[in-house]
């Protein structure tokens, strides 16, 4: 009886098996590569957030010292301070111009250009009246502007993926530069200026000022505690960070605690505090906080770059593995 079905040729069977295996295999490899690419893009966007906030940090630092000079001038109308005040305002403007350049590249991507424009408008309001407004108005405008800048820093953290960082060490470095240190910097400047005004006028605290200093004390102590805990977790998770951040964290803690102690003394015996103590101790705390920021931010960026390089290496391995498998199958088919 003749065969009604013809056996398919061997070559056809091999081609069918080749396609049956390689199509789903290719899909799996492609998905793995896509996931790795997404992780690379995630970390790269975090780096953009670090870059933007480093620029804002420089503006904030210059603004802190501009506030000091303007407050000192307005409380005593010391005309000899005008050149220094104008020079410091120019330094703020240069720092703002540097952020403008960053904003051109990254502002729309991070969705923060409008908020940055508002920060600049508020700064112009301060600098236009820095020689004529009252000391109280000057303090209020600076506090408002610094609050806007902290909101900007936080928004950059949100839109750049920084706040969602998946690794324990880099997450707590992020927390330091996006959350804790900016808060400490803002409130340390407030304590310095409120305390200095109190000492200059040689009077006791009003009830309002007492409540304000207590609030500022807590507003510094809480982020300081958060910073200490976060750095401890980060260095325990990644001991290689100890050499770069531990000593700076200690210096920041000591100087900030000195400012907190001075704040407590001011609430009880302001007459016993030297006329320059708040500027000296306050500026030291601020300088150490900025110094720590300038250590942590580049370290965070290095961790992100290292993560990107690991993902790129993994991507190459996956692609190489896929090519090798396909070559073996193709050689089998041809053979």
Image (cartoon, grey):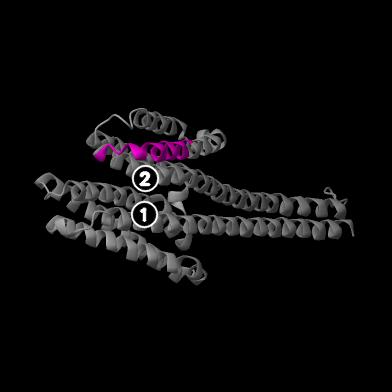
Looking at the image, which residue is at 16% across and 60% down? 272
Q: Is residue 97 above or below residue 215?
A: above
Q: Which mark is residue 64?
A: 2
Element on which disc 2 rests: helix
The residue range painted magenta reads: 76-93
- Magenta region includes residue 16: no
Q: If you read the primary sequence from the N terminus, does the residue marked by circle 2 or circle 1 appear first? A: 2
In-image side of 190 versus 208 (left or right): right
Looking at the image, which residue is at 15% across and 56% down? 271
Q: Nearer the viewer, residue 76 or 213?
A: 76
Q: Magenta-highlighted stretch: main secondary structure?
A: helix
At label 2, counting other C-alpha atoms closer than 10 Å, the crowd grade (few under 14, some 14-19, many 20 or more) is: many
Q: Is residue 159 above or below residue 237?
A: above
- Magenta region includes residue 92: yes
Q: Is residue 147 above or below residue 127?
A: below
User: Does the residue at mark 2 contact the one at mark 1 (Cβ under 8 Å)?
Assistant: yes
Measured as percent of width and height from the top left, residue 235 is found at: 45, 68
Mark count? 2
Q: Is residue 9 visible?
A: no
Q: Nearer the viewer, residue 162 or 173?
A: 173
Q: Is residue 230 visible?
A: yes
- Give the quarter of the figure containing the C terminus: bottom right
Q: Residue furthest right?
A: 335
Measured as percent of width and height from the top left, residue 139 is found at: 27, 39
Q: Nearer the viewer, residue 98 or 106?
A: 98
Q: Is residue 123 above or below residue 247?
A: above
Q: CA distance from mark 2 to mark 1?
A: 9 Å
Measured as percent of width and height from the top left, residue 152 is found at: 40, 40
- Residue under circle 1? 286
Element on which disc 1 rests: helix
Q: Quadrant of residue 128?
A: top left
């Amino acid at each position: 009886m003749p065969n009604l079905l013809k056996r398919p040729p061997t070559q056809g069977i091999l081609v069918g098996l080749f396609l049956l295996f390689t199509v789903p295999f290719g899909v799996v490899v492609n998905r793995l590569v896509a996931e790795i690419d997404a992780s690379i893009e995630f970390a790269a966007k975090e780096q953009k957030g670090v870059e933007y906030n480093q620029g804002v940090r420089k503006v904030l630092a210059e603004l802190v010292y501009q506030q000091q000079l303007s407050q000192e001038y307005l409380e005593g109308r010391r005309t000899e301070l005008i050149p220094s005040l104008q020079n410091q305002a120019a330094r703020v403007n240069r720092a703002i111009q540097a952020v403008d350049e960053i904003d051109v590249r990254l502002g729309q991507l991070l969705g923060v250009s409008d908020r940055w424009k508002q920060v600049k408008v508020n700064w112009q309001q301060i600098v236009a009246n820095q020689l004529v407004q009252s000391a109280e108005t000057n303090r209020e405008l600076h506090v408002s502007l610094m609050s806007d800048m902290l909101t900007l820093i936080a928004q950059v953290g949100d839109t750049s993926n920084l706040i969602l960082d998946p690794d324990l060490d880099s997450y707590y470095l992020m927390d330091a530069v996006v959350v804790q240190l900016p808060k400490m910097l803002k409130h340390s400047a407030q304590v310095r200026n409120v305390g200095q005004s109190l000492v200059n006028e040689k009077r006791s605290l009003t009830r309002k000022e007492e409540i304000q200093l207590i609030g500022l004390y807590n507003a510094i102590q809480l982020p300081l505690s958060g910073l200490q805990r976060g750095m401890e977790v980060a260095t325990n998770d990644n001991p290689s960070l100890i050499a770069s951040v531990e000593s700076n964290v200690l210096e920041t803690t000591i100087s900030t605690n000195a400012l907190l102690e001075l704040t407590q003394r001011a609430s009880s015996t302001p007459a016993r505090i030297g006329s320059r103590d708040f500027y000296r101790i306050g500026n030291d705390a601020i300088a150490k906080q900025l110094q720590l920021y300038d250590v942590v931010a580049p370290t965070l960026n290095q961790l992100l770059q290292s993560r990107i390089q690991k993902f790129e290496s993994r991507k190459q391995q996956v692609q190489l593995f896929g090519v090798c498998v396909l070559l073996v199958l193709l050689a089998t088919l041809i053979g």
